[in-house]
Structures are given as C-alpha cells and as structure tokens.
Image (spheres, helix red, strand yellow):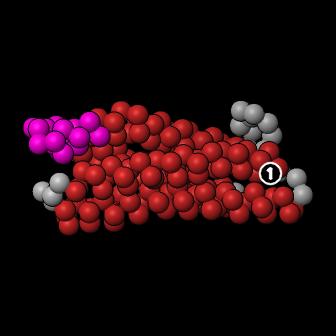
C-alpha cells in the first residue's frame, strides 16, 4: 500500500474511532445523565432518549464499518502481520486481543440495539399513551446503563490495546 493510501486509511480509521468511541463515551457519561437529570418525570424524556439512541446507532454502525475496512487495510500493510491467525510475534497476539475486545463490544452493542432499545421503545410508547410501564422502563434503563458502561469500558481497553500495538 502506498504511503498516501495508508495515510488516507489511517485518517478515516482515526475519524471513525473518534465518532464511535468518542461518541459512545460522550453519550454514556455526559449526555444521557444530563438529559435524565433535566427531564426526570417529564413525558419528553422517553422521546429524547429514543431519538439519541436511534441516531447514535446509525452513526456508530457506519463508523464500525469504516473501522473494519480501514483496520484490515492497515493490518495487512503492517510489517508485523504474518498472516491470518499467525500468532508468531507479540504484535499479532495483541492484535488478536484487540479484535476479540472489538467483537465482544460489537456483540454487546448489537444486543443493546436489537433487544434492549426496541423494548425501551415499546415501553416508552405505552408511557406516552398514559399506560402503566414505569417499572419495566426503569428495569430496561438499568439494563441499558449496565450494558453501556461495559461497552464504554471495552472501548477504553480497545484504545489501550491500540496504544500497546504502536509501542511494540
């Protein structure tokens, strides 16, 4: 791969990392807690959280696709890369760890998007129409927060393994 192509790939990889992990950390630790505090008990809370969740899912899924494509390009261009599942050097083993962390993070994100978020949406609609569902909504929000915190921790571990890879 040419230096220019590598630089472009790295730019988009870093941009996608900022969008995915930066957005995740920002939403998890700043936006959602502040929205919850400001709108606790308000009907608008459910709709705002639904919109934030849906929009971030779109953006983060696109960023994940960009990360996978650019990451594969960079991996195969790296002189430490010996081939698929060849773990002959420390770089390859750390890269495998990073890929495992990414896979776990992506699976938890899918669980959040395909299971918890739709359930929250259903309960939110019930609440917006004056039906009972507060206890279920609180239970699902706790589950969402737990998963989000685990995903955020995995994101930080992925950044740490990225730094480790560069130092090898």
Mark 1 crowdedness (10 Å alpha carbons): few <14, some 14-19, many ≥20: few
Magenta stretch, overall SS: helix
Q: How many marks?
A: 1
Rendering coords of residue 34 (x, y %):
26, 66
Return the residue at label 1. 78
Is residue 146 visible in the rendered image? The answer is no
The quadrant in which residue 117 appears is: top left
Q: Secondary structure at mark 1?
A: loop
- Of the pair 73 and 99, the residue shown nearer to us: 73
Rendering coords of residue 136 (x, y %):
16, 37
Is residue 155 visible in the rendered image? The answer is yes
* Residue 8 versus residue 158 in the image, above or below: below
Asked whether, in this view, residue 76 is left or right of residue 29, the answer is right
Q: Which residue: 64% across, 50% down?
A: 67
The quadrant in which residue 82 appears is: top right
* Residue 48 versus residue 120 in the image, above or below: below
Q: Which residue: 23% across, 43% down?
A: 124
As drawn, the residue found furthest toward the front would be 129
As drawn, the residue found furthest toward the right would be 2
* Residue 151 versus residue 11 in the image, above or below: above
- Of the pair 17 and 159, the residue shown nearer to us: 17
For the magenta stretch, what is the residue range? Answer: 121-140
Q: Which residue: 80% across, 45% down?
A: 76
Asked whether, in this view, residue 20 is left or right of residue 163, the answer is left
The quadrant in which residue 26 appears is: bottom left
Which quadrant: the C terminus?
bottom right
Q: Which residue: 84% across, 58% down?
A: 5
Rendering coords of residue 121 (x, y %):
29, 40
Q: Is residue 122 magenta?
A: yes
Rendering coords of residue 66 (x, y %):
65, 49
Asked whether, in this view, residue 1 is left or right of residue 111, the answer is right
């Amino acid at each position: 791969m040419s230096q220019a192509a590598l630089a472009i790939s790295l730019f988009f990889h870093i941009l996608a990392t900022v969008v995915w992990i930066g957005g995740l950390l920002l939403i998890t630790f700043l936006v959602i807690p502040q929205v919850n505090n400001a709108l606790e008990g308000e009907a608008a809370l459910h709709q705002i959280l639904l919109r934030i969740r849906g929009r971030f899912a779109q953006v983060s899924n696109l960023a994940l696709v960009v990360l996978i494509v650019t990451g594969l390009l960079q991996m195969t261009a790296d002189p430490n890369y010996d081939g698929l599942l060849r773990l002959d050097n420390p770089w390859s083993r750390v890269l495998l760890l990073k890929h495992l962390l990414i896979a776990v993070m992506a699976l938890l994100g899918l669980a959040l998007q395909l299971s918890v978020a739709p359930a929250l949406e259903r309960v939110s609609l019930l609440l917006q129409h004056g039906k009972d569902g507060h206890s279920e909504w609180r239970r699902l929000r706790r589950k969402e927060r737990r998963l989000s915190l685990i995903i955020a921790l995995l994101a930080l571990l992925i950044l740490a393994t990225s730094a480790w890879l560069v130092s090898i």
